[in-house]
């Protein structure tokens, strides 16, 4: 069976063909969209104001797209089932570029606060917002019978089509096949999935790609590739920024406090069903950085595996070994200080992780073929991801701007809810048209979630600062 079939190419609204493939046209529409441009002013790891060197959401997305495309090229060249039926590179690259469009200002902090504000009105979640941006909020196309803001005057139906993408392209960003309930308990945690308002669209996507009678987990091959590429980028490039900023070094990972390791294991690995001990955790870190030090770490790993010594003794052995080799310290320091070494490390890790990918062809529904990381590779990726999260994102140095972001998003939402006239003209027109409270709250949420970090601070400053921005700088 073919990996792509007629239903994949359909859109909600048709238009004349041109010289590009439908998927290439989708790619072009994304690149020219305001939502994509705004990613450059959204935080990836460190606040944008800290330095022009560190990655932002835009540069992160470009790196994810590049890794995803490399994975697809590798699979197309190596897998027999794909030789004459290759994965479409335009869709894969699109998924990498688009996967973070829905992130609000201040990343996961802003996401949680917006979800708290929207619990009674359908919730908020970054992936769900990405789909909403692509299929509704971007102002590329609307149905012909709609009014100037994209609604049907007679039926009041929302007829905005966003970028009017093909179903297969939209499916490439559906990481979580889960309907977020229209109303949730205030104490509920953030739910990943898609909004109730996009329920019918999801049904159309599934029917066109997997068939009318399909009823099962839904995740396309392009989405699976993007998901893994995102994990690889997060675990390597964010770590590179972490080293450059002197937040950490390879030796810091090796001598990580036992309490921190336990916390990471209990919070991040155990819920996923991964069996990880402190000894296993340290061994994986040693394996990841063995080539940096070139001082027998590999032989140390082998000896530790064979001895079966108690974990406490192993910890002492590792620390004693490190302390007795000053060159290990210098090598670790060089990774942080020397750009060649830093980039070399990142490049080798990305290559290693891409080589650790397994492919499973789905003969019944080729579109739902899957990719995954081998267990050893997955463990390495997860350890680096969770280390970066715990040491950097959860560090006291970032907690203050995180708290500030939380208060900014929350207060803007509350103030606009009480004073919707503060919305820009286009959002205000939609707010006044939709009438019902849940839809009006969604309009406010759409506006705030589309803000960049910088713009949300400026907007907040206009409301509360003694030295606000000029009134002649437009809000949009």
Image (cartoon, rainbow, N blue to C red):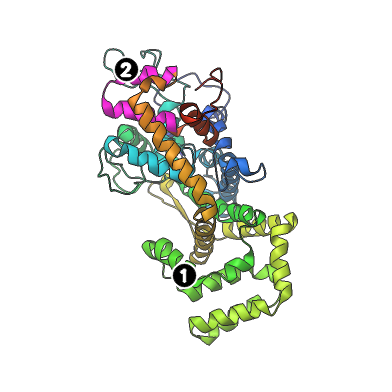
> How busy is the neighbourhood of tag 2: few (under 14 within 10 Å), some, or many (20 plus)?
some
| Residue for badge 2 | 433
Query: Magenta segment: does it hold 433?
Result: yes
Query: Magenta segment: does it hold 248?
Result: no
| Residue for badge 1 | 259
How many numbered dots are placed on residues in this image? 2
Mark 2–mark 1 distance (CA, rounded to whole Å) = 54 Å
Residue name at image x 46 percent, y 19 percent:
15
Question: How far across and how far down the image is residue 402, in percent?
Answer: 48, 46
**Which residues fall within the magenta stretch?**
425-448
Question: How far across and how far down the image is residue 472, in percent?
Answer: 56, 17
Residue name at image x 54 percent, y 79 percent:
315
Secondary structure beneath disc 1?
Answer: helix
Secondary structure beneath disc 2?
Answer: helix
Which of these two is toward me, 114 or 60? Answer: 114
> 252 above or below 429?
below
Question: How far across and how far down the image is residue 317, in percent?
Answer: 59, 82
> 77 above or below 469?
below
> How busy is the neighbourhood of tag 1: few (under 14 within 10 Å), some, or many (20 plus)?
few
> 332 above or below 150?
below
**Image mark for residue 400:** none
Which of these two is toward me, 365 or 224? Answer: 224
């Amino acid at each position: 069976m073919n990996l792509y079939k007629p239903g994949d190419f359909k859109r909600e609204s048709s238009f004349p063909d041109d010289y590009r493939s439908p998927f290439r046209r989708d790619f072009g529409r994304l690149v020219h969209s305001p939502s994509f441009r705004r990613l450059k002013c959204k935080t990836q790891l460190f606040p944008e104001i800290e330095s022009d060197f560190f990655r932002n959401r835009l540069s992160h997305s470009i790196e994810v797209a590049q890794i995803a495309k490399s994975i697809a090229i590798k699979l197309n060249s190596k897998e027999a089932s794909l030789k004459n039926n290759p994965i479409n590179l335009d869709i894969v690259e699109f998924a990498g570029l688009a996967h973070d469009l829905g992130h609000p200002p201040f990343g996961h902090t802003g996401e949680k606060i917006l979800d708290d504000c929207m619990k009674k009105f359908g919730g908020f979640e970054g992936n769900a917002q990405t789909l909403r941006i692509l299929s509704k909020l971007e102002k590329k196309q609307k149905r012909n019978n709609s009014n100037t803001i994209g609604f049907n005057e007679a039926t009041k139906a929302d007829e905005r089509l966003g970028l009017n993408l093909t179903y297969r392209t939209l499916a490439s960003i559906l990481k979580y096949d889960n309907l977020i309930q229209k109303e949730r308990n205030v104490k509920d945690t953030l739910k990943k999935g898609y909004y109730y308002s996009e329920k019918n669209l999801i049904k159309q996507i599934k029917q066109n790609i997997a068939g009318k009678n399909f009823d099962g987990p839904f995740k396309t091959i392009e989405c699976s590739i993007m998901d893994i590429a995102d994990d690889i980028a997060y675990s390597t490039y964010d770590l590179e920024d972490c080293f450059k900023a002197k937040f950490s070094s390879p030796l810091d990972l090796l001598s990580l406090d036992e309490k921190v390791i336990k916390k990471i294991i209990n919070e991040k690995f155990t819920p996923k069903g991964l069996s990880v001990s402190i000894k296993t955790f340290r061994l994986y870190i040693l394996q990841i950085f063995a080539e940096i030090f070139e001082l027998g770490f590999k032989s140390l790993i082998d000896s530790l595996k064979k001895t079966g010594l108690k974990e406490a003794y192993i910890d002492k052995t590792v620390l004693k070994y490190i302390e007795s080799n000053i060159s290990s310290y210098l090598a670790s320091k060089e990774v942080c200080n020397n750009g060649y070494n830093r980039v070399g490390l990142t490049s080798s890790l990305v290559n290693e992780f891409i080589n650790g990918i397994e492919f499973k062809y789905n003969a019944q529904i080729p579109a739902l073929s899957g990719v995954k990381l081998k267990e050893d590779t997955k463990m390495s990726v997860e350890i680096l991801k969770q280390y970066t999260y715990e040491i950097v994102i959860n560090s006291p140095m970032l907690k203050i701007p995180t708290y500030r972001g939380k208060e900014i998003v929350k207060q803007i939402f509350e103030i606009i809810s009480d004073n919707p006239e503060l919305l820009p003209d286009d959002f205000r027109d939609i707010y006044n048209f939709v009438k019902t409270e849940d839809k009006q709250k969604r309009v406010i949420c759409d506006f705030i979630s589309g803000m960049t970090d910088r713009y949300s601070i400026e907007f907040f400053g206009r409301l509360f600062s003694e030295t606000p921005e000029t009134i002649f700088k437009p809000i949009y």
